[in-house]
Image (spheres, rainbow, N blue to C red):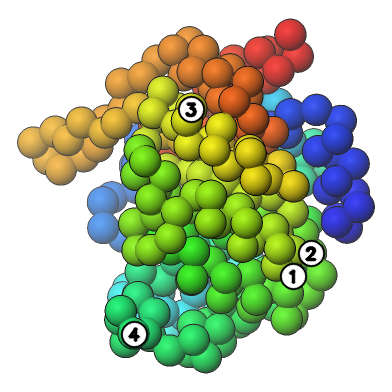
Amino acid sequence: MTREEFQKLAESGVILLDGATGSNLRKAGMPVGVSTELWVLEHPQAIQKLQMEYAEAGSQIIYAPTFSANRMSLAMHDFQGDIRKLNADLVSITKEAVGERAYVAGDMTTTGKMLEPAGDMSYQELMQVYQEQAKALYNAGVDLIIAETMLSVDETVVLLDAVQSVCDLPVMCTLTVEADGTALFGGNAVEAVETLQEMGAVAVGLNCSLGPDQLESVVASMKKVAQVPVIAKPNAGMPVMDEFGMAHYNMAPEQFAASMKKLITAGAGIIGGCCGTDPSYIRLLNAMCRD
């Protein structure tokens, strides 16, 4: 996918992304605390069933399960294997499920380590981690790359730099923010749009952390400065933890879709769902967009 093709897609109407991965895989039997990426390799049918349902529900872009398939995150699960092959295998699983029905996005995220001077991660070290995964995703044949659930504007800048240094795929960026638009490790939603679109991101926005009913003013403030589409991929409300430490999300699909309609009015041009959403949510969003 070229930048021009992405722009054409964005100009044709609201782009529909997929919904949650992790919360649905847990329902399918994935234990808490394991590497999602390594579990998916052993249970590909679980993710493929979900991705086929997202494609059928109307998702135009589906995320490959490569979220934390970077050297630093996988080290926490004692993975010493081939990052290139791991990403290639995960992308292949998604491509097999989706076929020609949707674009496949290579999914990248934070390492969870803070950059200097706030933390001990150097720019160069983080750059190399992201370059390695971005190159693997590009070689695996993804259509575009998404940087999601990013914790600060600074680390998103490094990720975008890294991707652009190894390929020319379109890159979408979403941060996770507080209700006032502040990113968890630094910067804010408006700053993210201004900085990342200037650097060449094809779309910038928000995912995770909050429900759509809490993001209307944040999306509106982003739209005021945006020269690229604004993304909204929120959770199905705020999580409620049970006695086993499992998160449950209580916003019903109808309520979610009604709140997402307000986000489109506020300026969101690319929408989807994060934690707690499933294909039924995407189906309703698709019907809403068609109407």
Q: Which mark is residue 216?
A: 3
Q: CA distance from mark 1 to mark 2?
A: 8 Å
Q: CA distance from mark 3 to mark 1?
A: 34 Å
Q: CA distance from mark 4 to mark 3?
A: 33 Å
Q: Quadrant of the N terminus?
A: bottom right
Binning the other alpha carbons within 10 Å of mark 1 as few (below 14), some (14 to 19) or many (20 upward) gives many
Name the side, left or right, on which 238 lies relative to 36. left
Residue at the far left in the pictured view = 243
Residue at numbered disc 2: 169
For mark 3, give the secondary structure: helix
Of marks 1 and 2, which one's residue comes earlier in the chain?
A: 1
Above-or-below relation of 233 to 186: above
Q: Position of residue 121 (x, y in %)?
A: 38, 85
For mark 2, give the secondary structure: loop
Residue at numbered disc 1: 138
Say which of 194 and 263 sits in front.
Answer: 194
Q: CA distance from mark 1 to mark 4?
A: 31 Å
Q: Quadrant of residue 238?
A: top left
Q: CA distance from mark 2 to mark 3?
A: 30 Å
Residue at numbered disc 4: 117
**Residue lying at 58% horizontally and 17% vertically, measured from the top left:** 261
Q: Quadrant of residue 241?
A: top left
